Image: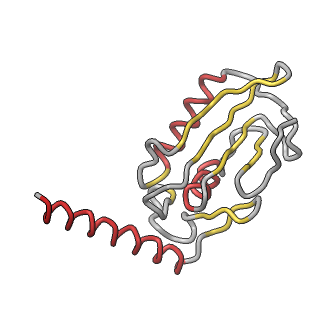
């Protein structure tokens, strides 16, 4: 059993699911967190059967290929072992280019997610616009700094 519970910062999955990218986006758009694969909802380590290297590559590819903007440097995939059972911990930082969304779907409530308690929720349009405005203003200020100091 893990020493953490499923909450705002931790998500347990027995296996990699179709909603994996949504979970990652929710953590990127809120406070960051951890996804444990090979762990049931009660925190018991079930373990991973099969090729762990292949699973790690699938995780990396799902994050890299299906989430925008770039998540490079915002996550790590770690293989852990307890009681001779291997499981994976994906550590996700809070993103600094929010909002993050499913690639190909744009910044809509159907593709932007946030973490609320131990679940994910669609990000409301107002929140998407607010986060996008903050990022846009930050980029403008960075551009002005370059112009003024070069």
- In the rendered image, which quarter contains the N terminus? top right
**Residue at (58%, 46%) from the top-left corner?**
92
Q: Quadrant of residue 62?
A: top right
Which residue of the protein is positioned furthest toward the front in this rendering?
149
112 displayed left or right of 68:
right
Q: In this view, does 123 lie above or below 68?
A: below
**Residue at (76%, 43%) from the top-left corner?**
13
Q: In this view, does 136 lie above or below 75?
A: below
60 displayed left or right of 80:
left
Q: In this view, does 8 lie above or below 11?
A: below
Q: How many marks do you count on the picture?
A: 0
Looking at the image, which is closer to me, 2 or 119? 2
- In the rendered image, which quarter contains the C terminus? bottom left
Which residue of the protein is positioned furthest toward the bottom in this rendering?
126
Q: In which quarter of the image is residue 116?
A: bottom right
Q: Where is residue 50 in the image (x, y as percent from the top left)?
A: 72, 22
Which residue of the protein is positioned furthest toward the top in this rendering?
84
**Residue at (55%, 49%) from the top-left corner?**
93
Q: Where is residue 4 in the image (x, y as percent from the top left)?
A: 81, 44
Q: Is residue 21 above or below residue 58?
A: below
**Residue at (34%, 70%) from the top-left corner?**
136
71 displayed left or right of 33:
left
Q: Where is residue 41 in the image (x, y as percent from the top left)?
A: 85, 47
Looking at the image, which is closer to me, 105 or 31? 31
Q: Where is residue 10 in the image (x, y as percent from the top left)?
A: 73, 49
Which residue of the protein is positioned furthest toward the left in this rendering?
150
Q: How is the image coloured?
A: secondary structure
């Amino acid at each position: 059993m893990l020493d953490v519970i499923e909450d705002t910062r931790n998500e347990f999955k027995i296996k990699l699911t179709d909603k994996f990218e949504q979970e990652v986006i929710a953590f990127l758009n809120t406070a960051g967190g951890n996804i444990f694969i090979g762990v049931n909802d009660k925190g018991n380590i079930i373990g991973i059967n099969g090729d762990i290297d292949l699973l790690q590559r699938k995780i990396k590819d799902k994050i890299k290929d299906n989430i925008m903007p770039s998540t490079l440097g915002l996550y790590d995939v770690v293989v852990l072992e307890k009681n001779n059972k291997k499981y994976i911990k994906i550590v996700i930082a809070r993103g600094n280019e929010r909002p993050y969304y499913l690639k190909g779907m744009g910044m809509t409530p159907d593709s932007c997610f946030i973490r609320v308690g131990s679940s994910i929720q669609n990000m409301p349009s107002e929140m998407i616009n607010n986060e996008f405005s903050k990022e846009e203003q930050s980029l403008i200020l960075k551009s002005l700094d370059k112009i003024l100091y070069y």
